Image (cartoon, grey):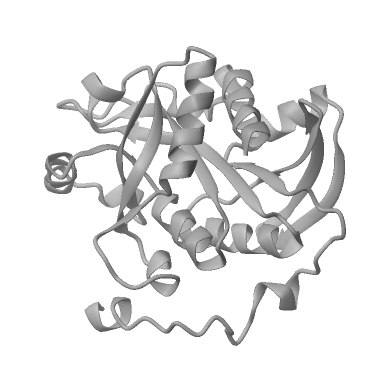
Amino acid sequence: MATIFHHFYENKNAFINPCDTTAKIPGFPEVCITTFSECMIEKYAETNETKVIANLCSANGTLPVYEITYAGKKMALSLVRVGAPACAACLEELIALGAKKVVQFGCCGVLNQPAADGKIIVPSSAVRDEGTSYHYIPGSEEISAESSSVDMTVQCLEKHNIPYVVGKVWTTDAIYRETPEMVKERKDQGCIGVEMECSASLAVAKFRDIPIAQFFYGADNLDSGKWEIRDLADFGSSMSDKYMQIAFECGAAF
């Protein structure tokens, strides 16, 4: 597996490219907001003025891409699939549609409760414990977020007096293989949160030369003797208005 993950091919022309499956839409909004919670997207679409401008289609079903207007700026809004490979494919297709900047947010598990509890987590870097990113950029243990995107996100949070922390996260492919030993190792490495897409999304963005801003809200807690599910099963619905506003503010500032 080390041979596979560290034998990177720089050729951007793949056998199947996003433009082979997804046609560019003239006038597609420059900024695209993405998240993983279907209930958040549906709630917003039902209570605000939106229109469907595209669809992302797969065997999992169809994901509508909405056009919305926030602070006088048109943006796209779309659900992306959970997990690095599926999320990366969605991002590829959104970029192929015409997106030039992406804001992505979702939940994560808390690995450092004193540092992150009750705060928005802005990833400064991510441990690449997934396979997708290695097909977009050369192998390395971590990938860094662009400082300009981190700074922009922080400025939006400070503007609205929202508590936050900037730090490293752990991106993993295997949610049911977060063993106690691995959790301790990642905590010792400085990770304050764990999720499934950040490093892959950063890699896609770097490969396609697209700026991406990301943030997370803590859901379950792994920084204790026993797993605490907390509001993980809520899928962010109870605080969806807050999280969506943060994302739209970032989109407006991009």
Numbered label tally? 0
- Residue at image location 32% in from the left, 20% down from the top: 117
Looking at the picture, how far across and down is residue 252, in whole percent?
68, 32
- Which residue corresponds to the image point at 75% horizontal and 59% vertical from the top-left? 98
Q: Is residue 45 left or right of residue 242?
A: right
Judging depth in this view, the residue of 220 and 125 nearest the camera is: 125
Vertical comparison of 145 with 163: above or below: below
Q: Indicate left or right for 199 with 15 as reference.
A: left
Which quarter shows the N terminus? bottom left
Q: Quadrant of residue 52?
A: top right
Q: In the rendered view, would you say 92 is above or below 118?
A: below
- The spot of residue 136 in percent (x, y) is 45, 71
Identify whether 13 is placed above or below 136: below
* Residue in view at x 67 percent, y 54 percent: 100
Q: Is residue 41 above or below residue 7?
A: above
Q: Quadrant of the C terminus?
A: top right
The residue that appears at 45% across and 28% down in the rendered structure is: 154
Between 92 and 110, the residue placed more toward the observer is: 92
Q: Position of residue 114 (x, y in %)?
A: 22, 19
Q: Residue furthest top?
A: 161
Q: Which image quarter: residue 10?
A: bottom left
Q: Position of residue 5 (x, y in %)?
A: 31, 76
